[in-house]
Every structure is written in C-alpha cells, then in structure tokens.
Image (cartoon, helix red, strand yellow):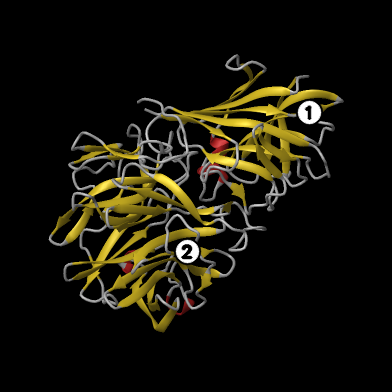
Amino acid sequence: MRKLLLVFFCSIAIAGSAQIKFTNPILAGFYPDPSVTKVGADYYLVNSTFSYFPGIPVFHSKDLKNWQQIGNVIDRPSQMNFLGDGVSRGLFAPSINFHKGLYYVTCTLIDRKGNFVVTSKNPAGPWSDPVWLPEVKGIDPSLFFDQNRAYIVYNSDAPDNKPLYSGHRTIRVYEFDPINLRVIGEESQLVNGGVDISKKPVWIEGPHIFRRGDWYYLCAAEGGTSVNHSQVILRSKSATGPYVAYKNNPILTQRNLDPNRNNPITSAGHAELVEGPDGKTYAVFLAVRPYEGDFYNTGRETFIAPVKWVNEWPIINPESKEIKYSYSADFKEVKNKYARPQSGNFSYRIKFKDKFDPALLFLRTLDNSWYRLNQSGLTMNLLSETVMGNGNPAFIGKRQQHLKCEASTELIFNAKTDNEKAGITIFQSEYNFYYLCKSISNGQPVLQLYKGNRDSKSMDLLAETNFAGVNVYLKIEADKDKYNFYYTTKANDWKLLQANVDGKFLSTKVAGGFVGSLFGLYATSSGTPSINSANFKWLDYRGNDL
C-alpha cells in the first residue's frame, strides 16, 4: 500500500469506484470502546482515552472508512484532569449522540465523580463543561432519543448490591431530560446478569438502545473486554422493556475459534450499530490483533463489519465466523485527501510549529508552561516529574498503530547531570516502558536504554554507549514481540544500541490495564529541579503490517 504524508488540512473528494473496501482495523492502535452516530451524510465517532489528555477524540467520516480527527471532547484542564490517576483509569467508554441540533457525549470518570454529559453544537468543539449525573451509578452511559422522550442506559451493580457471582452486573435506565441534562423519575432495571443469568454471564456493559421499525433493541457487550468478549442483543416493544434476548446470542464473538489460527483478530465486542451510506447496517466495535496467544501491544482498536438482519434480529459478520481484515461494500468512497491515514500501511512526519496535532497525548492534563513550539521544533523543559509517577511529566506521545513499525526523532540536548535525561520512549504504563535517552554517566555524555521496573519503582539500565554530540537521531523499531533501539548523528545511518528487547513486557497481558503502547518524547530531571531543556525537531512514524 502506498505510504502517505501527514498534513493538516482536509479536502474531501469522491473516489471514482462505486465499491469501497474497508481495511481493519479502521482506527489502528489504541482506539478502544468506539461509539458512532450518523448525522445526515456524516458520521462521528469517539473512543476511550483513560488518563491521557486531551480526552475522547472525535473523528469524522463520510463513508465509515476514511476518518479524520477533528477535535477532542475534553481539551481544557478546566473541564477535568486526571492527576493522581493510574494510566488505565480516567475516562471509560464514551457514547456520542445527536438530537435537535445538539451533540451529546456521555462518559464515566472512574474513581471520581462518575458519570457525566457534555454538549456542543459543533462536534469539533468546543464542548461544554461536564454536567455530573450522581443518580447514574455505574459505567458506560449512553443516550437514546425516542420521539418526545430520552433515556440514559448504563451498566450498574447487581440487584440490592448483592452479586451472585464475580462479574454479576445489571443494565439500568432512567428517563433523561436533554434540555436540563438531568434524570427524570425512577431507575428501572432492564437486564440482570446478562442474556441468561443461569449461565452466570459476566460484565454486561456498553449498552446502546436503538429503534428499528416497531422494535426497540438493547445491544450490549458481555464476557469482559478480553478473549471471552462478545456482543449480545435483546429487544422489546417498549424502550423500558421488558427485553427478550435473541435465542442465538451472541451476535458477535471470536472466543470459540482456534487460538492458533493465522493472523487472528480476538476479543471482539463493545459494538454499536449504524446505518451505512448504502442504507445497510454496519457494526463498529473493538477488537485486538495479537501477535502470539493473547499478547498484543497496540491496545484495543476500532474495527468494522457488516450486519445482516434475520427475522428482525441483527447478526454481525454473518458470512464468516472470523472477523476479516477487509470488507467491500457497494457505495462510493469519500476520501479525506489530506487527512492522516488511520488504517493499512502508512507513514507520516509530525512537525512542531504553532500547535499540536490533535492525536498527540499528554499524561493526565495539559500544562503549557513546560513546552514551547516554534520554527526550531518542540522545546520541553526538564521536569522533576517522571512517567513512573501519577502527575504530568514532560511527555508527549502518539499511539503505536502497527505490529511492525518504527518511530524516530531528532533531539538537541546537552545534559548537565546524570539526573537529566531526554529522548524517546515506548510506553504502556507507569512501569512498563523502555526509554532511549541522552544523559551523563560518570561525568561523560552517554546514550542509555532503560526499562521500567515495577518492583523497585525505578528504571533498570539495559545498555549504554558514549556519545559526545549535542544533536542525535533516535529510533525505536517494533516487530511484534521484539523492539530494537538505534541512534545516529547522520540521518538514515543508524547504529544499533540494543536488539531484540522483549516486547511482551509492553503487552496488555503482562502490563495489565486497558491501554495500548505509545511512542513518546520525554524529558526529565528525575526528581530533582532543573532549568535545562531539550529540543525535538519532529516525530516520524512508519507502519507496515500488510
């Protein structure tokens, strides 16, 4: 596939072919818990971001294939921050809706104030400050607008807070006032446990209600967001039930397939159904691409599959048990000619000029006091805060979007002490990361490679070499479960510092949590004050899975 260059202006053009071909995932890398809504001929999609900032990216598409990030829902520290939170806490499972000229996003700020709603007349933002919903106790809230009424549906506790088994949850609903942004009346329980509580189903969550014809459908995930993940469907003649489960549930899962099959897609679920440009139904959902067993470093990604209606029940991916890496549909592709590619093979350079690309992520909040953007690139002050804490270190990351990829940067930095370090990291969590950096050791300038250590709450030195220059190019290369680390003083004349470093250390299975890995630019004075700074010229990314 041709490699594309990142630029920052959007020009929309109609492709000549009448058939579109989707490449899964449609949003590669750490883009979990997708929610999608259709407004006229436009589609808008949001994802979870946990403790990264800005929170909840907003994507736009005309064809469900070509997506451009147009903003972020949580883009101001005055809305909220995640200081003190672990990387995999923060914002869980947003849902986006549109009603009478207004866009709504509901979401959960876990461990804190809980569920909230924000609104905007423009999906690109700015979005309002959050309105908290204290009565909505649980996670994964979403809205449903039904003629003159609205409802908020969500995952909640077991009846009377007395679970019959681990993972016993319910789906509940309130009527909702979309003008005053508050619940109305009493809470109702729609689902207890799952589609068949006698089988002890776990983690019924991510619910969405929609209407088709005379039926109201409740679509939800079940089984937990790992290898047993699935999607189930229930229906009723009323929005508030009673709901009857489809006898052939689940309507999507990969849990019964051979785990040793070639190039598997696993853990599929958390789906939302949407009408495509051809009038047919499509499912947008999360899944993962393990390189071995249940090991994957790219996090939970956004996939698409067709939906077939059988006896007024929707079946996701009806023609194959396995989710496919590509699907075709009979409608025209609408390309965002200059937008960043999100699926397939691609390459781009992020330049630092007057503003950040909206896909770049900080840890927990945005503090513009420690960085500067100008013609020379990105200058970052060395903060005493490290990525091993729960604050806001001098860190800016982009998602690893391919199993086979590389990220590189040009760094200008002169360390003064051995506490001062600047470079590039591949980061999954507070202690599951590798850090290739320039520093000082025994009074001499060096390049170092570190590995996070959860037991000692520190970093272990893996490799070191003398390096006296101020300018250096740094590169991290990923190949499934192996990572290679390079440096050079001349572009494309790479010298290997360390090869075949264990990539499983960065996987969700080892590191835990709900996020994927990020390539990050990172500068720190390691707990001591510093007036030093580091300059990064650019960040290159190249991905080649296909």
Q: Give the answer, above or below, for where 78 lies relative to 303.
A: below
User: Residue 348 appears at what percent x and percent y?
Assistant: 48, 30
Residue 222: mark: none
User: Residue 480 appears at what percent x and percent y?
Assistant: 48, 30
Query: For the C terminus, which image quadrant?
Result: top left
User: Residue 79 appears at what percent x and percent y?
Assistant: 58, 63
Residue most extreme to the right: 443
Which label's residue is closer to the chain start, 1 or 2? Answer: 2
Q: Is residue 192 left or right of residue 282?
A: right
User: Residue 149 appears at what percent x and percent y?
Assistant: 31, 78
Residue nearest the observer in this picture, 296 or 129: 129
Q: Quadrant of residue 179?
A: bottom left
- Amino acid found under the numbered disc labelled 2: Cys
Residue nearest the observer in this picture, 312 or 417: 417
Q: Which residue is mark 2?
A: 107
Q: Give the answer, above or below, for where 419 lies relative to 199.
A: above
Query: For the N terminus, which image quadrant?
Result: top left
Disc 1 crowd, CA 10 A, few/some/many (<14, 14-19, 20+): many
Q: Is residue 285 visible?
A: yes
Q: Which residue is mark 1?
A: 414
Q: Is residue 484 left or right of residue 159?
A: right
Which residue is at a point 46% across and 33% down the rendered structure image?
6
- Amino acid found under the numbered disc labelled 1: Asn
* SS at circle 2: strand
What whole-number distance in Å separates the C-alpha atoms at marks 1 and 2? 43 Å
Give the foreground label among 1 and 2: 1
Disc 2 crowd, CA 10 A, few/some/many (<14, 14-19, 20+): many
